[in-house]
Image: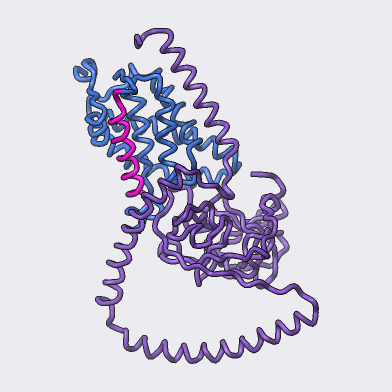
Chain colours: A blue, B purple
Amino acid sequence: MKIKLSGSLPSLMITIVTLIFLDIVATSVIPALGLLKFRLGFHVLIILFMGFRLDTPFLAPLILLIQYVHSVFSVEGWAHGTFAGVLVCLIVGYAKDLLSFSSAISTIVVTQIFQTCWFLILTILAFFRTNSWPYVVEKFWLFIPESICLSLMSPLFFAFLNRVWRTSFSASEVEA
Amino acid sequence: MDYLSPERTKLKLGLNILVLAASLYGVSKKNYQDSKVSPFEAVMIESFAPIQKLIYFSKYKVGSFFDHYLFMVDADKQNKHLKEHVYELENKIYQLQEIERENLRLKGLLGFGQVEKSKVILAQVVGWDSASQFKVLRINKGSRHGIQTRSTVVTSAGLVGYVYRSSNNYSDVITILDQNIKVDAMVDRTRSHGIIEGFSSNTCLMKYVTRTEPVIIGDQVITSGLGNIYPKGLRVGKISKIEKESYGITQFIRITPNVDFRKLEEVVVLINGPKSKKPVNLSELDGGSPL
């Protein structure tokens, strides 16, 4: 969907509030339930949605804004996620015509593929810094369950964000 | 503006390049040792950390209801046993106080520098980092309570980590399980030095211990006091695995921390007085190369 930034401020605000709420869930509720190893990066889903659905030249600054808000809840900071997010959205931009969101299964598969791209970019950055294979392996074993869980949630989550941003499936996707 | 116009494409390309360049610069400048909180981050942390605190507080209350009311079957027996234990410990403390006084007198005679006592701040855990690869926790005390970045954080069981960043009322503590932390430590029994790094969700690695050091599984590891972050003698963990390769000069040692991070609820932050501020030498802990 082609958007004008001035008309999308309410949608952006709702998205940021949603991100804050979900980050609070990830940092407090999930650890309070005893799941210390398991955190869900909802910011990844939001940025992927923006890459899939929004056709705006201001996508990169939007990703930066989302990552900056997310950095309040993580020492990872804004830079790594912004770099990965912009690169992934560039790939999404080139592959957009090939992507299908006609069913929940296809949405789950596409989300999983691009989460993997995100993970690979972050892992390469982490490997440059740490030069440690065990660290990469540890990250990978954490990534698998977390990313699958996020992918399974993506149809519902994207449906919610579709309403927030008033986007809809294109005719070709519905026909498919 | 026409959405298919070249101006729009140019704008998109320009913004992408600008943001990618800024983020790459941010990646290269990222410092995992400590961080200053920006005004925006401070406002956000101060606004939303109370919600995290409320969630954790509810969890403590529900947990304590079960612990204090429902699971009290053996409380009377335990109480008698603990009273006897307290009596024994009080005797021991008295003996140790005598030894401490003697130790101070002898140190004074030998001309050792006086050991400065740390100010102690008790804090509650209110949240964890939102990314699972970072083992960072948030506590409900900040710079208003006297907490400074790089202050040591402990529990009665041992070392937790140090303060990474702090706003007025909240601080983020980077734990010893995190891969970005380096602790200069030594094996208590053999006095063998090494550097501890976070490895996984419940283990750390002890690096640079030479193969010839006679360490064994179960040995207690303590902080060495080098690096000027952690005081000497804090318990870190016990050796749980040792691997010696047929090549190389060091051994691969895994440490299980003394602190049970899954059940961590309260921590103690040690604040050194202004007199004891020494230059922190983190690069030494990393084998001389900057992170």
Measured from the top left, where is residue B91 in percent x and y? 54, 92
Quarter of the image with the C terminus of chain A in it: top left
Query: Looking at the image, which is closer to me, A125 or A75?
Result: A75
Total marks placed: 0
**Is A19 within the magenta?**
yes
Residue at 52% in and 54% down: B174
Measured from the top left, where is residue A118 in percent x and y? 44, 33
Extreme-left residue of the structure: A175
Residue at 33% in and 63% down: B57
- Residues in magenta? A7-27
Quarter of the image with the N terminus of chain A in it: top left
Q: Hey, which quadrant is residue A29 in on the image?
A: bottom left
Query: Looking at the image, which is closer to me, B200 or B110?
Result: B110
Residue at 66% in and 87% down: B99
Magenta part, dominant SS: helix
Measured from the top left, where is residue B173 in percent x and y? 50, 56
**Is B16 within the magenta?**
no
Query: Looking at the image, which is closer to me, B260 or A163?
Result: A163
Q: Hey, which quadrant is residue A64 in on the image?
A: top left
Residue at 45% in and 62% down: B261
